[in-house]
Image: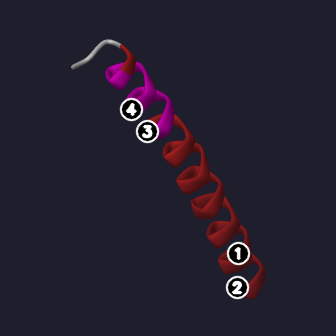
Amino acid sequence: MHNYHQTAAATVNRWLVEWQAFETKVERISTKHGA
């Protein structure tokens, strides 16, 4: 069970990092277009 929890945490962390990168990209695009 412990291994499963470690894998789940790693997956969530990766998802959060990717989501933050996506949000940053969107914010940059919005700023560029003056939205």
Residue 7: percent from left, percent from top: 72, 68
Q: Position of residue 30 (x, y in %)?
A: 33, 22
Q: Is residue 11 left or right of residue 19?
A: right
Residue 23, which numbered label?
3
Image quadrant containing the N terminus: bottom right
Left or right position of 34 against 25: left
Relative vertical location of residue 29 with respect to residue 14 in this rendering, above or below? above
The residue tagged 1 is 4
Q: Which residue is mark 4?
A: 27
Q: Circle 3: is it few (<14), some (14-19), or many (20+) Cα within 10 Å?
A: few
Alpha carbon of mark 1 to alpha carbon of mark 4: how far?
A: 34 Å
Query: What's the amino acid at mark 1?
Result: Tyr
- Tag 4 and tag 2, C-beta contact below 8 Å: no
Q: Looking at the image, is mark 1 or mark 3 earlier in the sequence?
A: 1
- Single out the mark in the foreground, 3 or 4: 4
Nearer-N-terminus badge (2/3): 2
CB atoms at circles 3 and 4 under 8 Å apart?
A: yes
Magenta region, residue range: 24-31
